Image (cartoon, grey):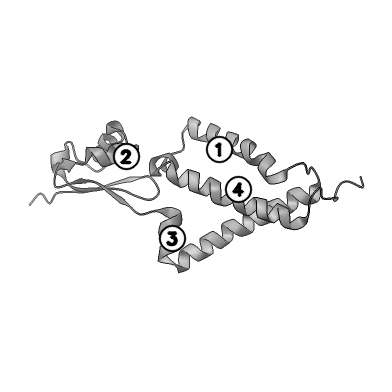
Amino acid sequence: MSDLFALAMPWWEFILRAVVVYVVVLGMVRLSGKRALGQITPFDVLLIVLLGNAVQNALLGQDTSLGGGLLLAATLILINYSVGWLSTRSRRIETLVEGEPVLIARDGKLLASILKRELVTQADFNAAMRQQGCSDVSEVEMALLEINGHITIVPKDKT
């Protein structure tokens, strides 16, 4: 019971570990592409669980105390809140953290190299077209891959 709140390392090391792990994992998630974030699949759920397990030791080191776990949880929540707060007040930080929409089709032409770079399949693009009432890419004025991973289709004016 006496080890319940006894930290195995200095309190500031928990905070430093949390900041470093948060920034590195956020960077890796951003590099993985918008599509991975936009639609949660069973593979994404598995990745999230495994990521949590993979970074556990990086966060806790040898510490198994209640105090260490609570300090890490509080630090991660504070970092996440701070990133959200900063993102709403700075366009530069918002773009850095969340990215920007990407043009994937224009004037009836699919930008295949960008589609591939953003890890969007032809099937996903076709499904988005059908949802917006377009049966062929020639009917598309513009298509954007939004920052949340959804595809927005702007159909050509039919008049």
Task: Using the numbered discs, state the Cα–Cα distance from disc 2 to disc 3 in whole angstroms.
Answer: 22 Å
Task: Using the numbered discs, state the Cα–Cα distance from disc 4 to disc 1 in whole angstroms.
Answer: 14 Å
Position of 46 relative to 143 (above/below): above
Discs 1/2, front: 2
Task: Using the numbered discs, state the Cα–Cα distance from disc 2 to disc 4 in whole angstroms.
Answer: 26 Å
The 10 Å Cα crowd at callout 4, few under 14, some 14 to 19, many 20 or more, is: some
Spot occupied by residue 119 in the image (x, y as percentages of width and height):
35, 37
**Residue in the image at 88% along x and 46% along y:** 3
Spot occupied by residue 159 in the image (x, y as percentages of width and height):
7, 52
Q: Name the residue under label 3.
A: 94
Q: Which mark is residue 117?
A: 2
Task: Using the numbered discs, state the Cα–Cα distance from disc 4 to disc 3 in whole angstroms.
Answer: 20 Å
Label 4 vs 3, first from the N-terminus: 4
Label 2 vs 3, first from the N-terminus: 3
| Relative horizontal placement of residue 100, taking residue 14 as reference (left or right) | left
**Residue in the image at 62% along x and 36% along y:** 54
Q: Mark 4 points at which residue?
A: 21
Label 4 vs 1, first from the N-terminus: 4
Q: Mark 1 points at which residue?
A: 48
The 10 Å Cα crowd at callout 1, few under 14, some 14 to 19, many 20 or more, is: few
The 10 Å Cα crowd at callout 2, few under 14, some 14 to 19, many 20 or more, is: few
- Say which element carries label 2: helix
- Say which element carries label 1: helix
